[in-house]
Amino acid sequence: MISTLRTRHLFFALNRQLLGLTLGQGQVHNFATSSITSGNRAIVYTSNGDPSSVLYAQTFPNLPPPPPNTVNVKFLLSPINPADINVIEGVYPTKPVPSHSLSTSGKGSKDSSLFVGGNEGLAEVVDVGPGITGLQQRDWVVMTKPQSGTWISSKNVSAQDILKVPRSGLSEAQAATMTVNPPTAYNMLHDYVELGEGDWVVQNGANSAVGQAVIQIAAAKGLQTINFVRQRDQIDHLKEHLLGLGATHVVTYEELCGKSFRDKVKEWTGGKNIRLGLNCVSGKTTTFMARLLGQDAHLVSYGAMSKEPLSLPTSLFIFKNLTCHGFWQSRWYLRRTPKERERLFKTLASLMCNGKLKGPEHEVLVVSGTDEDNQASLKIRDTMARLARGKFGKKLLLKIEETL
Amino acid sequence: MISTLRTRHLFFALNRQLLGLTLGQGQVHNFATSSITSGNRAIVYTSNGDPSSVLYAQTFPNLPPPPPNTVNVKFLLSPINPADINVIEGVYPTKPVPSHSLSTSGKGSKDSSLFVGGNEGLAEVVDVGPGITGLQQRDWVVMTKPQSGTWISSKNVSAQDILKVPRSGLSEAQAATMTVNPPTAYNMLHDYVELGEGDWVVQNGANSAVGQAVIQIAAAKGLQTINFVRQRDQIDHLKEHLLGLGATHVVTYEELCGKSFRDKVKEWTGGKNIRLGLNCVSGKTTTFMARLLGQDAHLVSYGAMSKEPLSLPTSLFIFKNLTCHGFWQSRWYLRRTPKERERLFKTLASLMCNGKLKGPEHEVLVVSGTDEDNQASLKIRDTMARLARGKFGKKLLLKIEETL
């Protein structure tokens, strides 16, 4: 049914979509957007598809007091990450859980396929349920449960799905973006090879949010990094920026694939084995990058921006003992203990507080409390359409105010 | 200099090559093939190249009594493995050590680039040096040091480079071929994933020597195997043969790449995760094979018969947590303790003695003691040329007799 809906949606005019949604062959359901005019607002969808077509804003009743072992939180900032788009499109392996608790009219099956967008976000504790220890009003928390739905003004969450982060020393933007990209960078640098001061790491897509975090965390550990980026206008400006973050070398893919580049790397490293490569590109240039790795190295992939496969000579595996892994922060959260998560966040927060790990360059999109739901929906869809056209150079953070 | 030699060799007539070898620009060295007419014979080369051009037979003085902690052994059977060809061609990562000890005229720099072919072989202990315990005359031993040069009638070897194998219950051919292929199969089945009865393994190149060992060792463990082979005349005969060895299913690459094959596999496995894949082919069909693997699986490569790279969607790494490794038995020997090697050989010998692991179908090529060196050289070169043209369907085992 979801795929039927996805196709049908394309035939609806935007305004029509804002007020109603096809639930089956021709059946139209009017949303309660008019009946609830103030309260908790969320950016939601009921079927997968292009975010600029399927997302809409909806206001729900304010939250009741938190049940035992839960807290009510108010979201301060929630990023729009590329994976969020894939989740809405339905092409991401993790599916969000429908938000039954947001029912607009008490119990009912109406909301069985209502999803709130967003995976990551910074929230402030507003009300603490019975049985909660170690958390109080005004504490900052981040979500550790994947796809929990963060594009919302307020939410009731289970204590086990959140982690407290320090309020002092961190900006809101840093805290709001600290559960996906910085841990990905940190864990890839620590989970596969034991690296010590002066050791080398190569990575591609070095200008990505993860790539920039890799550069900084590596530099803080005394590691040296060779960073590959796309050739572009003002490449010198980018190189300078990454070198400023702590990169040892910044190199374009053209240089990487050039004839004598391996010799240059040998000069740089003094012939020292490079034992870790991080890949978010795949395709031909990654084959060249893998060839720079030495005996017993690990190549860890966390993306495939080229949309090409990871293609490597089998001899690298057999004779150089290369091991290839994939890293996915969502899996890390699912498989690690709360203690391990806590330790990770403490480490990241400390790096941030010490100025060793900067927050992303960002822009905040406020969904204002004075907007009506349909105005807010238009704003969100327009933003998504612009995002798809690559109109934002910076990380986009949502601030969804309660509907007044 | 080696590459110069390789090219120059092509311009020499066969007989000329048998008697002399270019050492530099036009400098010709006559070998002592005529001065030593009886004794220890070896199949040797002094420069890399096509084995049918660079190999020759040479007779050396018989061995002196063994120095401390060494034994003198007589080779019974020594296989010609594909990797041996690559070593002679100079395209294999492990380089053999020159055989200084075979000097035909006492000390001298003449033999500094003399290499004896062969990596694997079964030998019998003939004489035991001082300090040796646990070995006596007539014991069977196999070589655990890579590229030790086994195409020879007799040899002095260090006790730490050999392992005793039981004489009873094993055929000469089984014992002579037990250090490369069966351990590769055994270790790949044990070193990456803990598999229990009823678990599934997929492998390609299932008709290779390693592949057949995988089928048998897996069956002995109660594992189920899906085995991929090339389409060929009399495919039913091959399928029957592999099923007879204990294969659960035998499938051609055409079937593997067919539309509904994944559904068929799901039926076979009852949806159970397949967590181990073994690859000696790479290329497109291996991509299809990798897609059959479930969450947290390991793909272990030990060859690339397609001569194409291993090319996999990055999503398999990220979202299915696939890990790709390479296996190389030579590395295993270098990195494992003598105790571990011993344990492995005991296990393999026991599987062989119990009829659970058959020896390879083979043919024995006798280099007769009554042949003169140049006759023996012709025979070896002819064999190598026929081998290169795919004229042997079976494993070829050399029996090099002492020159009479």
Image (spheres, coloured by chain):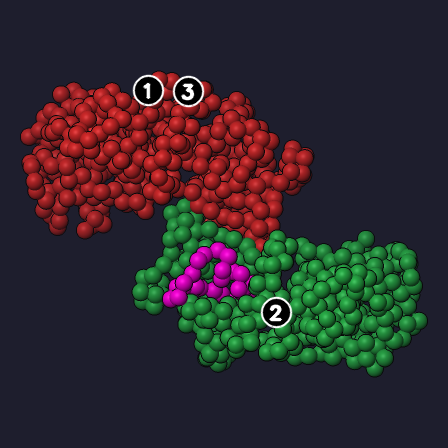
Chain colours: A red, B green
- The image quadrant of residue B81 is bottom right
Q: Residue at x 46, y 60 (%)?
A: B277
Whether labels 2 and 1 belong to a single chain: the reply is no
Q: Is residue A225 left or right of residue A212?
A: right
Please name the amino acid that badge 1 sits on: Arg
Please name the amino acid that badge 3 sits on: Cys
The residue that disc 3 covers is: A353
Q: Are marks 2 and 1 in contact (CB under 8 Å)?
A: no
Q: Is residue B312 left or right of residue A84?
A: right
Does residue B344 sit above or below B232 in this rendering? above
Which of disc 3 and disc 1 is earlier in sequence?
Answer: 1
The span from disc 2 to disc 3 (Cα, nearest Å) is: 60 Å
Q: Residue at x 69, y 64 (%)?
A: B162
Identify the chain of the residue marked 2, using the numbered disc in the image: B
Identify the chain of the residue marked 3, using the numbered disc in the image: A
Q: SS of the residue at dot 3? A: helix
Does residue B71 sit above or below A65 in this rendering? below
The residue that disc 1 covers is: A167
User: Most extreme residue toward the top, as rendered?
Assistant: A168
Q: Quadrant of the C terminus of chain A?
A: top left
Please name the amino acid that badge 2 sits on: Met
The span from disc 2 to disc 1 (Cα, nearest Å) is: 64 Å
Q: SS of the residue at dot 2? A: loop
